[in-house]
Every structure is written in structure tokens, then in C-alpha cells.
């Protein structure tokens, strides 16, 4: 890390022994060891925090891209659904316009007539609406 060779460490130890003295040198060395360990832990924590922030930024970018993709899919589906609805409405309006009954007189407005094939109480039978007979006819 500091790129110090063994000979340099030996020279530093001899100078420290002379300056500090043999009685206080173990205590100073222990204190320096603790400080060095704290410094390494602090640097490791800072690196981990930076790494987490980078991952969070990547996750946020991914989240934004996924939200954009979801919005575009939602818009596409909405357009397709509205186009299909308008097509169905157009298809539903065509037979209604072709089969439209003439406008009733104002005298008949009080008692409206049911559409053909329906009685006042509702459809006579589901088979009649479909054009099917309830009993099969015998062929001669």
C-alpha cells in the first residue's frame, strides 16, 4: 500500500526506538496499530458506501427504464383497445342503421311497439332468435 521495503521499516523502527525510548515504544506501536486498523476499516466503509451508491444509481436507472417501457406498453395497449372499441362500435352501428324502423308517430309514443320477434314480455324463445326450431322437422 505505501510501497515500503523491509530496510525502510527497519530504519523507521530504529529511529522510533531512539526518539520514543524503549519504555514507551510498545504502547506507541499498539496505538499506531489501532489507528491503522481504524483507518483501514474507515476506508473499507467508504468503499462499500460508494459501491452501494453506484449500485443504487444503476438500480434507479433500471427502474426508470422499466417504468418507461411499461408506460409505452400501456399507451400502445390503450391505443389498440380504443381502436378495437371504435371498430366494434362502427360494426354495431352498421346493422342498427340498416334495420332501423321508421320513426313512430307522436300518437304511438305513449305505447311503444316491441321489435319484431319479441313480445312485450321479452323474447319468445332463444331458439326463435337464432332461427332454430325446438323440434326437428321430419323429412319426407
Image: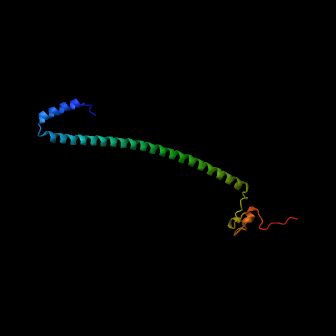
Q: Residue furthest bottom?
A: 121
Q: Count the marks: how many?
A: 0
Q: Quadrant of residue 56?
A: top left
Examine the image and state in which quarter residue 107 appears: bottom right
The quarter in which the N terminus is drawn is top left
Camera-side residue of 70 and 101: 70
Give x and y (percent) for residue 118: 72, 66
Foreground residue, 76 or 21? 21
Against 19, residue 101 (above or below) is below
State whether residue 8 is above or below residue 119: above
Q: Position of residue 99 (x, y in %)?
A: 73, 57
Q: Position of residue 19 (x, y in %)?
A: 12, 34
Q: How is the image coloured?
A: rainbow
Q: Is residue 56 left or right of residue 130?
A: left
Q: What residue lies at 17% left-to-right and 34% top-to-bottom?
A: 13
Question: Seen in the image, is 8 located left or right of residue 105?
Answer: left
Q: Nearer the viewer, residue 92 or 81?
A: 81
Whether residue 116 is visible, yes or no, is no
Quarter holding residue 113? bottom right
Q: Position of residue 136 (x, y in %)?
A: 80, 66
Residue drawn at 45 percent across, 43 percent down = 62
Q: Is residue 121 above or below residue 63?
A: below
Would residue 10 be found to the left or right of residue 53 on screen? left
Task: Tell me if I can see residue 37 in this picture.
Answer: yes
Q: Residue sitting at 70 percent across and 56 percent down?
A: 96
Query: In the rendered view of the protein, which quadrant contains the C terminus?
Result: bottom right
Residue most toward the right? 140
Q: Is residue 67 left or right of residue 53?
A: right
Q: Nearer the viewer, residue 133 or 13?
A: 13
Amino acid at each position: 500500500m505505501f510501497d515500503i521495503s523491509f530496510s525502510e521499516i527497519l530504519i523507521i523502527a530504529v529511529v522510533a526506538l531512539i526518539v520514543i525510548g524503549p519504555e514507551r515504544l510498545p504502547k506507541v506501536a499498539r496505538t499506531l496499530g489501532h489507528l491503522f486498523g481504524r483507518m483501514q476499516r474507515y476506508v473499507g466503509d467508504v468503499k462499500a458506501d460508494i459501491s452501494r451508491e453506484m449500485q443504487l444509481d444503476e438500480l434507479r436507472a433500471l427502474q426508470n427504464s422499466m417504468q418507461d417501457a411499461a408506460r409505452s406498453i400501456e399507451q400502445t395497449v390503450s391505443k389498440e383497445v380504443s381502436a378495437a372499441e371504435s371498430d366494434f362500435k362502427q360494426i354495431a352501428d352498421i346493422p342498427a342503421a340498416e334495420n332501423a324502423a321508421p320513426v313512430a308517430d307522436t300518437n304511438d309514443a305513449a305505447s311503444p311497439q316491441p321489435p319484431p320477434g319479441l313480445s312485450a314480455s321479452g323474447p319468445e324463445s332463444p331458439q326463435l332468435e337464432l332461427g332454430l326450431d325446438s323440434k326437428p322437422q321430419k323429412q319426407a
